[in-house]
Image (tube, grey):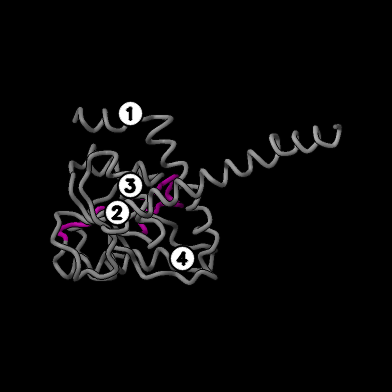
Amino acid sequence: MACKRQLSKFFWFVLFPILLGLTLVVVCNLWIVLSTHGRVYASTEQIEAHPIGLVLGTSKKVAPDTPNQHFQNRLSAAAKLFQEGKVKQLLVSGYRDSRYYDETEDMIDALKKLGVPEESILSDDKGARTLDSVERAKSIFGFDRFVIISDDFHVGRALFIEDRLGIRAVALRSESVAYTSSSRVRMREYFARVKAILDLYIWNPTEGIAGIAGM
């Protein structure tokens, strides 16, 4: 009997929470990926013209002497989208905490080097999270239809957020970074998708929608 009680406690206090957590991660990830994959495009030719392209930010480097391939690929995809006339402007949205770290300024510099004129670039340095970037594209800049540009594993979450916020968008996924160089951020994305669903449906189910509706 004592052994059975120990096994029961082990199941309910150890195994069950682990299984519940794993189930939550799997369900949230499937929900986001399956509900958005039909609007994720790998080629600019597949995308209709939109007024704006929203480029989601990331750091320029992963180490002092190591460029971030995710950054380079996103900006290359955004520049191509603009140069092919699929968007009239690009809105770069990222995080800025000081003059020493400014994702948006780095993105603007990269786009200019790729041939995008500065007057065609808008900047939002308060896009600390994907949720912030997508919501502010409408609530602050007034866009309710745009193309999201980011990594293949990231754009689904951004599209899921815009669905919840009443925005019409499609996504252009940038060239994939090899798994050996992106395993950490890909793993983090599994949990970021869970947090996105909790943000939108549990913790603040109406805050973002109400804020946009009032504009």
Place residue 197 in its image quadrant: top left
Name the kind of residue labelled 3 in the image: Phe
Name the element at disc 3: helix
Name the element at disc 2: strand
Q: Which mark is residue 68?
A: 4
Tell me if 90 is positioned left or right of 189 in this view. left
Sequence order check, earlier mark of 2 and 1: 2
Name the element at disc 4: loop
Residue 119 seen: no
Give the residue displayed 23% in from the left and 33% down from the top.
Answer: 212
> As rendered, which of 206 and 126 lies closer to the eye?
206
Residue 98 lies in magenta, yes or no? yes
Q: CA distance from mark 4 to mark 1?
A: 34 Å
Which residue in the structure is indicated by mark 2? 92
Sequence order check, earlier mark of 4 and 3: 4
Q: CA distance from mark 2 to mark 1?
A: 24 Å
Sequence order check, earlier mark of 4 and 1: 4
Q: CA distance from mark 2 to mark 4?
A: 17 Å
Q: Which mark is residue 160?
A: 3
**In the picture, which quadrant includes the N terminus?**
top right
Tell me if 81 is positioned left or right of 28 in this view. left
Q: CA distance from mark 4 to mark 3?
A: 25 Å
